[in-house]
RNA sequence: GCCGGGGUGGCGGAAUUGGCAGACGCGCUGGACUUAGGAUCCAGUGCCGUAAGGCGUGCAGGUUCAAGUCCUGUCCCCGGCACCA
C-alpha cells in the first residue's frame, strides 16, 4: 500500500493516512517535464491526422490572470484529448509583445520597453509551465523581436507593391492618452478601447492605410461558410462590414439660368420613395456648406452649432438620443426624377462619414425624416401605399401619412403602380441611363489605418526622398531595426523622429539623402498572421514555408475571448485573403472552428484592481495546485459562459482530486479478490458506471464542450467507487481497469495528478500518447431501471423493471404499485400512456 | 430601435429528442473517527407543512396524458450594433 510521509509543515496527520500533496506531485513532474522540450512537439513525418489547436496569444502585461488560465485550460484539455486520440497535434504559444503598455511602463519606471517586455514574457512563461500547459515551446513566437517583425515589414512591402498599402491625408481618430492614432476598430462608442474614459478626437493627419475594403464583399460572403464560428461573432462582423445596397442620385443645385450648377449626390436605399422627397439634408461637415456660408455668418454659426451637437452626441456615446435639429440654407436643389425644387437643409442627424454625407428626406417613409419634418413643418408626401396586410398597423395615426413598409408606388410619375422592389431596379436604371445616378453598394467598413505615432512597434519600411518621393525599403535591407535607447516622452510626434541615426537614410533609387518613416505599425498587424509563423517559426528565408501551411491550415480550433470578434478576427481574415492572393497559401480562411469563452468574474463583477477582486493564478497554484486551478476553471461553468470565481469552489475540486488520489493510492496493487464481475452485482454496477462515464466525457469532447458536466460525471464515478469500496471488495481485474481509465479520463484536466497516478499504477510511457479509453455500449447499458408512474401527470410511484420491458409489462408493474393503486382507487381509468424506458402515466376521471 | 445570449434552491450550475426539475460542486445541519478538526468518512438538505399532502424553473395565458423545454403576449438582466439614409 502506498504511503505518504508527513509533511513537516502540517500538523500531525496520522501516519496511516494517505494525503494528496499537490505541491509535491506538481514540483516533481514539473521538473521531469522541464527536461524535455520536445514533449509536446508535433511530429514532422507521420500518417496521423493533423490537429491544430490554438489559444489567442497573450499580451505580456506582466502576469497571467484567471481569464488566461481559463482560456488555456480549455485549449490544453482539447490538445491532450486529441493527442490521446491519435492526432498529430500542433499546440503552440507566443507573445503579442509590441504595444503601448511597454512604452508607458518605460516612462513610469525608466525601464526600456524591450527589457520590460522580455522580463514579463519570462515570468508569464514560467507561470504557464507551472500550470502544466502542453505547449511546443520550440515554436514560440515573440512579435517584438526582429526575426518576427522583419516579416511584418516584408508583408507591408508586398501590400504596397499591390496597392494594398497607401498613404493619405485624412481625418483620423486620435486618443490623447495613447498619444497616437487609432483604427476605427479601436474606437468603441466614441471612446478609446483602452481608455474608456477618454473621448477620441479627430485629427487631420497623413497616414498609412491597408486596403481592407477591397475585400469587403469576400469578408462578408465567406462568413456564410464559417459554420464552426459562433453566430454572435459572425453577426458582429456582418454589422461591422455593414454592406448596404442603394442608389446614388445627383441633385443639381437650383441656380439662375446660365450659371454653373454644383451637384449634390445623395445615397439612398429607397430610391422608390424619391417622389416623396420634400427636402435635401446635408451633414454639417458637408463640403458644399463652406460655399453656402461664405457670405452668411449666421448660417456659419448655426452649422457650427450643429457640428458641436454631433460631437457632443459622440461623446455621450448615443448619437440617436440627441434631438434632431436643422437649419434651412435657403438654397434649393432639383429632383432629377420630377424636376421639382426642394429646399436644402443642414441637419445634425446626417453623418459625413457614411454614404455621401447627403440624403434626400422622405418624411412619409422614413422615421427620422418624419420626425424632422414634423418639427420643422416640412411637407409630408406619400409615395407608397403599403400592401393591404400592413395597412392596419402602419397607418395607426391616420392624421399624417407614414409607412416604412413595402407596397405600391403612387404619385410617382411613370413609376406609379410598380412594386417597391421592381421600382428600385427601374428607377436606378433610369438614373444610369440619363446620367444622374446609378445603383451602388456602400460599406461601413473603412480602410485600416495602421500608422501609430509611438515607439514600441514595427517600423514601417518606407523612405521619403525629396527627389523620388515615397520609396519602399528594398527587401534585402530588411529588417529595419527598431533602435534602442530611444527617449520616449509624450511630447507629441513619433519618438523615432527624434533619433537622427534612424531618420537619416539613403534613397535606394537616387542615392541621395532620404528620411525614414518614423511611425510604427498598429500591433494588430503582428497578430494578423502570427499563427502562420508557428507552422515554421524558425524560417529565416521567408515568413513560412507554404508546404507547411498547406499541411497545418486551417486552424482546427481557435479559442479566445469574444472581445476580438471584430478587431483581430477580421484583420486576420483579411490578411489570409491577401496572402492567398500573393500565392503564399491556399486556404481562404484562417480558422475553421472558433470558440469564444466567457469572462472570469468575481462577485458578479469583472476582476479589477480598483474593485480589489482580482484572483491571482500564482496564488491559486500555491494554495491549491495547478491541477485544481485548471480543473476548477473548467468545472465552475460551461466554457462559453461567464464564470463567477469562488474560492470555496476550488476547494471542492481539490477535495475531489484528493479522493481520486487516495482511492488509487490505496488500491494501486490490487489484492487477490475472489469476487468476479459476473457474480457480483456491485462489480457490475461499477463496470456500468465506468462505461457510462467514458461515454459522457467522450461525447462532451466531441460535441458541446460542457467540461463542467464531464467533470461532474467523473465525480459521480468516484463517489460510486467509494460507496462500493466500503461495502465489498472489487474484483482485481475490474479494479485495475477502472483505475486506469479514471486516470486517463482525468489526464486532459489534471495532467499532474494523472501523471503521478499513471506512474503509481506501474504504467510506462507518456500518458499523453496513451489511447483514450473506449466504452462498450453493452456494458454501459442498465439492466434494471426505475420508471416513474404518474397519475394525471403527478408522480405517484416508482417501479423497478428490467430495462427492456415492453409496454404491457410496464403497465402491469405500474398498476401493481401500492401507491399507484391507492391513487387510482375508485376512479375510472380513461387512458394509460406508457413510454418504454421513460414513464407510465395513468389518466383517471 | 435592431441582432445575439440569458432569467431554474442560500450560491455556481444540471436536465442534448416534451417524459421523476434541482445531477455534480459549494454552503449549511447532524453523525463517525479523533487529544484536536479548518483533515477524512457517512447521512440529510428546493419551499410550505408534525404529517398526509400541496406549491414550485421571471410574469400572464395557451397546446398536450405530460412543458424549464413547444406556441402567444409581457417584464427584467448581460453583450454587440445603431439618427447607416
Image (spheres, grey):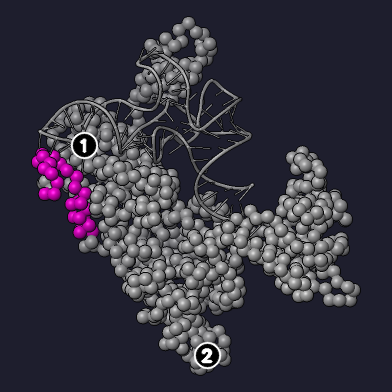
The residue under the point 36% across, 62% down is A93
Q: Which residue is tagged 2?
A: A509
Number of other residues with Cα within 10 Å of mark 1, as a class: few under 14, some 14 to 19, many 20 or more: many
Residue A23 lies in the magenta stretch:
yes
Q: Which residue is mark 1?
A: A735
**Labels 1 and 2: the sequence-earlier one:** 2
Span colored in magenta: A8-33
Picture layout, residue A401 above or below residue B31: below
Magenta residue check for A618: no
The quarter holding residue A240 reads bottom right
What residue is drawn where x is 31% and y is 56%? Answer: A133
Q: Relative to the observer, which residue lies in front, A434 or A115?
A: A115
Quadrant hosting residue A789:
top left
Rendered location of residue A757, percent (x, y): 21, 46
- Residue at image point 75% right, 72% down: A297
Q: Chain of mark 1?
A: A
Residue A460: mark: none
Counting the numbered discs, the total is 2
Amino acid at each position: 500500500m502506498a504511503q505518504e510521509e508527513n509533511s513537516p509543515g502540517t500538523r500531525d496527520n496520522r501516519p496511516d493516512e494517505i494525503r494528496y500533496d499537490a505541491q509535491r506531485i506538481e514540483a516533481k513532474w514539473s521538473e521531469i517535464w522541464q527536461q524535455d522540450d520536445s514533449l509536446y512537439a508535433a511530429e514532422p513525418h507521420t500518417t496521423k491526422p493533423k490537429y491544430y489547436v490554438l489559444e489567442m496569444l497573450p499580451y505580456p502585461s506582466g502576469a497571467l490572470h484567471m481569464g488566461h488560465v481559463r482560456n488555456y485550460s480549455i485549449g490544453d484539455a482539447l490538445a491532450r484529448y486529441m493527442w490521446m486520440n491519435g492526432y498529430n497535434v500542433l499546440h503552440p504559444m507566443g507573445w503579442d509583445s509590441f504595444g503601448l503598455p511597454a512604452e508607458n511602463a518605460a516612462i513610469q519606471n525608466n525601464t526600456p520597453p524591450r527589457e520590460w517586455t522580455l522580463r514579463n514574457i519570462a515570468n508569464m512563461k514560467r507561470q504557464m509551465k507551472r500550470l502544466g500547459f502542453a505547449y511546443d515551446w520550440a515554436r514560440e513566437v515573440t512579435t517584438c523581436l526582429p526575426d518576427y517583425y522583419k516579416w511584418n515589414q516584408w508583408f507591408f512591402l508586398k501590400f504596397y507593391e499591390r496597392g494594398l498599402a497607401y498613404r493619405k491625408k485624412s481625418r483620423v481618430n486620435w486618443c490623447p492618452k495613447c498619444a497616437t492614432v487609432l483604427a476605427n476598430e479601436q474606437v468603441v462608442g466614441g471612446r478609446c478601447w483602452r481608455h474608456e474614459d477618454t473621448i477620441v478626437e479627430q485629427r487631420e493627419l497623413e497616414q498609412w492605410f491597408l486596403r481592407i475594403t477591397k475585400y469587403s464583399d469576400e469578408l462578408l460572403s465567406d462568413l456564410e461558410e464559417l459554420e464552426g464560428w459562433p453566430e454572435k461573432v459572425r453577426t458582429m462582423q456582418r454589422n461591422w462590414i455593414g454592406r448596404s445596397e442603394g442608389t446614388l442620385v445627383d441633385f443639381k443645385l437650383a441656380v439662375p439660368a446660365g450659371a454653373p450648377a454644383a451637384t449634390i449626390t445623395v445615397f439612398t436605399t429607397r430610391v422608390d420613395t424619391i417622389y416623396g422627397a420634400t427636402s435635401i439634408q446635408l451633414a454639417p461637415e458637408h463640403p458644399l456648406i463652406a460655399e453656402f456660408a461664405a457670405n452668411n455668418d449666421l448660417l456659419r454659426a448655426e452649422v457650427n452649432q450643429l457640428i458641436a451637437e454631433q460631437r457632443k452626441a459622440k461623446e455621450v456615446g448615443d448619437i440617436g438620443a440627441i434631438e434632431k435639429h436643422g437649419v434651412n440654407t435657403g438654397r434649393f436643389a432639383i429632383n432629377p426624377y420630377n424636376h421639382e425644387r426642394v429646399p436644402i437643409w443642414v441637419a445634425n442627424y446626417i453623418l459625413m462619414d457614411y454614404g455621401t454625407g447627403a440624403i434626400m428626406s422622405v418624411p412619409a417613409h422614413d422615421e427620422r425624416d418624419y420626425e424632422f419634418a414634423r418639427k420643422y413643418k416640412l411637407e409630408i408626401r406619400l409615395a407608397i401605399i403599403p400592401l393591404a396586410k400592413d395597412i392596419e398597423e402602419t397607418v395607426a395615426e391616420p392624421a399624417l401619412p407614414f409607412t416604412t413598409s413595402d407596397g405600391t408606388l403612387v404619385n410617382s410619375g411613370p413609376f406609379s403602380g410598380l412594386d417597391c422592389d421592381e421600382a428600385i431596379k427601374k428607377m436606378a436604371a433610369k438614373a444610369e441611363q440619363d446620367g444622374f445616378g446609378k445603383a451602388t453598394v456602400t460599406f461601413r467598413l473603412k480602410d485600416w489605418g495602421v500608422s501609430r505615432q509611438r515607439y514600441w512597434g514595427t517600423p514601417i519600411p518606407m523612405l521619403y526622398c525629396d527627389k523620388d518621393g515615397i520609396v519602399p525599403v528594398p527587401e534585402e535591407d530588411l529588417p529595419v531595426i527598431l533602435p534602442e535607447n530611444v527617449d520616449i516622452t509624450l511630447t507629441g510626434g513619433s519618438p523615432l523622429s527624434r533619433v537622427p541615426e534612424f531618420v537619416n537614410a539613403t534613397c535606394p533609387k537616387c542615392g541621395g539623402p532620404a528620411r525614414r518613416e518614423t511611425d510604427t505599425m498598429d500591433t494588430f498587424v503582428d497578430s494578423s498572421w502570427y499563427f502562420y509563423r508557428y507552422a515554421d517559426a524558425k524560417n529565416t528565408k521567408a515568413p513560412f514555408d507554404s508546404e507547411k501551411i498547406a499541411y497545418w491550415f486551417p486552424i482546427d480550433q481557435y479559442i479566445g475571448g469574444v472581445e476580438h470578434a471584430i478587431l483581430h478576427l477580421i484583420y486576420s481574415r483579411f490578411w489570409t485573403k491577401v496572402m492567398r492572393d500573393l500565392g503564399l497559401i491556399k486556404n481562404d480562411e484562417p480558422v475553421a472552428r472558433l470558440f469564444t469563452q466567457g469572462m472570469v468574474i468575481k462577485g458578479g463583477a469583472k476582476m479589477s484592481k480598483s474593485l480589489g477582486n482580482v484572483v491571482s493564478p500564482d496564488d491559486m497554484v500555491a494554495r491549491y495546485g495547478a491541477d485544481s486551478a485548471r480543473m476548477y476553471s473548467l468545472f465552475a461553468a460551461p466554457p462559453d459562459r461567464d464564470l463567477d470565481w469562488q474560492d470555496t469552489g476550488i476547494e471542492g475540486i481539490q477535495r475531489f482530486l484528493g479522493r481520486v488520489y487516495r482511492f488509487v493510492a490505496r488500491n494501486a496493487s490490487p489484492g487477490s479478490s475472489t469476487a468476479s464481475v459476473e457474480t457480483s452485482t456491485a462489480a457490475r454496477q461499477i463496470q456500468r458506471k465506468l462505461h457510462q462515464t467514458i461515454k459522457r466525457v467522450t461525447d462532451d469532447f466531441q460535441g458541446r464542450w460542457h467540461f463542467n458536466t464531464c467533470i461532474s460525471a467523473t465525480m459521480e464515478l468516484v463517489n460510486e467507487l467509494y460507496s462500493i469500496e466500503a461495502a465489498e471488495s472489487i474484483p482485481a481485474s475490474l479494479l485495475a481497469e477502472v483505475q486506469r481509465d479514471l486516470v486517463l479520463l482525468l489526464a486532459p484536466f489534471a495532467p499532474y495528478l494523472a501523471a503521478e497516478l499513471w506512474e503509481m499504477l506501474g504504467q510506462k510511457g507518456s500518458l499523453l500518447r496513451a489511447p483514450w479509453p473506449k466504452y462498450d455500449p453493452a456494458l454501459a447499458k442498465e439492466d434494471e431501471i426505475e420508471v416513474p408512474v404518474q397519475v394525471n401527470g403527478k408522480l405517484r410511484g416508482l417501479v423497478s423493471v428490467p430495462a427492456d420491458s415492453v409496454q404491457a409489462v410496464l403497465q402491469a408493474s405500474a398498476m401493481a404499485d401500492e401507491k399507484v393503486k391507492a391513487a387510482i382507487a375508485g376512479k375510472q381509468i380513461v387512458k394509460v400512456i406508457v413510454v418504454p424506458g421513460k414513464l407510465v402515466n395513468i389518466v383517471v376521471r
